[in-house]
Amino acid sequence: MKVNGKHYRSIWFDSTSNTVKIIDQRWLPHKFPIVELTTRQNFADAIREMWVRGAPLIGATAAYGMAVQMLNDPSDTSIDETWEILHETRPTAINLRWALNHMRELLKPLPEKSRALVAMQRAGEICDEDVEANRQIGLHGLEIIKQIAATKPPGAPVNILTHCNAGWLATVDWGTATSPIYHANEAEIPVHVWVDETRPRNQGAQLTAWEMDSHGISHQLIVDNAGGHLMQNGEVDLVIVGTDRTSANGDVCNKIGTYLKALAARDNDIPFYVALPSPTIDWSVGDGEKEIPIEERHGDEVTKVWGKLDDGTLASVQICPDNTPAGNPAFDVTPRRLITGLITERGIAEASPEGLAKMFPEFVR
Ligand code: MRU
């Protein structure tokens, strides 16, 4: 997508410097730093510390991390160690394991001397595949938006609520939940986006609001607690969120707070869709509510808030008494019964074992 008129992906191989580059998302929206990742440790730090984040982008970054390590040491031991080092960085987003397994299975049968080249090529393809999957998700989601637009007075916007950042910054390009929104905007269907701030890391406030502004999409930032009220008052037509891991039976793990939005949407008869590319489906997990590991992050994310002070300096401030203990579960699971449909690259699947199996028969064991 575009930043100040220039097209960017969230990760790319720069053939001039022969390095992998990313946008260091910790500084958005106030700064736009581009950094090179040159060592396996760089890649691990970037994922763990959330320079990059969002399940599809985490997967793409891990694939490039494995590829860069092959330039340094293409041995079997190096592949296994890299798998472990990158895998332990974040526990919930399944695209990480998907990408690492994929790279390991591809590379192990190859002679060592050809591994680096093949790995770099494949990492690039994984990025391209993510972009295309998200584009397709956008086209399928666009049909939902078109149908709702047809029920409204001419020119009235379709009001869409989204949570966290499932935008192009969370993927390689387009985003998952935002792709239908970007496609609707291109099709000149008026949309208005309610952007949940998404405490504690504020991915909605810092990233989604920035994306919407960069693309000239009508939006308003709301506190996480406002969604239910807006739904009750007829100000939300549709909810679209992303996911970090969806189980084979259709339960959706996503950023903390998603479940509450799904409950409010159900109580108000508002369609609640989840947008996801197929590598976000964990076919080994049946019951998402019981089996998906939920990342517990540092309490500082809850007790402090980072942002821009009135004088323009960037700072972190404490918002509670000294030494307040904090709990910080980063994700929750929305049970499939609350989900209207799963918008995948192949079409809209029912959130059920049968729905996913019908859409992706080749993965069913
Ligand atoms: O903790 P993060 O920022 O990596 O959170 C992941 C997400 O971006 C969201 O949960 C998103 O809604 C799903 S990933 C497209």
Image (cartoon, rainbow, N blue to C red):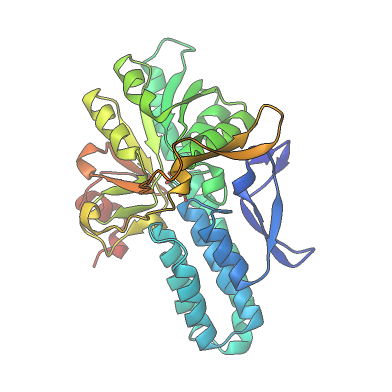
State the residue at coordinates (49%, 23%).
191
Q: Is residue 359 left or right of residue 50?
A: left
Residue located at (47% from left, 47% from top): 300
Q: Position of residue 166 (x, y in %)?
A: 47, 42
Image side of residue 48 versus residue 263, left or right: right
**Residue lying at 27% horizontally and 65% vertically, measured from the top left:** 284
Q: Position of residue 139 (x, y in %)?
A: 46, 39
Task: Name which quarter of the figure residue 149 lies in.
Answer: top left
Residue 110 point in image, percent of width and height: 53, 86
Q: Nearer the viewer, residue 245 or 294?
A: 294
Number of marks in picture: 0
Instruction: Indicate whether 120 appears above or below 72.
Output: above
Is 243 drawn above or below residue 266 in the view shown?
A: below
| Vertical placement of residue 167 versus 16, above or below | above
**Is residue 121 among the parts visible in the rendering?**
no
Q: Residue at x 34, y 39 (%)?
A: 258
Work out which residue is located at the far front of the displayed protein and give it. Answer: 322
Q: Quadrant of residue 339?
A: top left
Residue furthest to the right in view is: 16
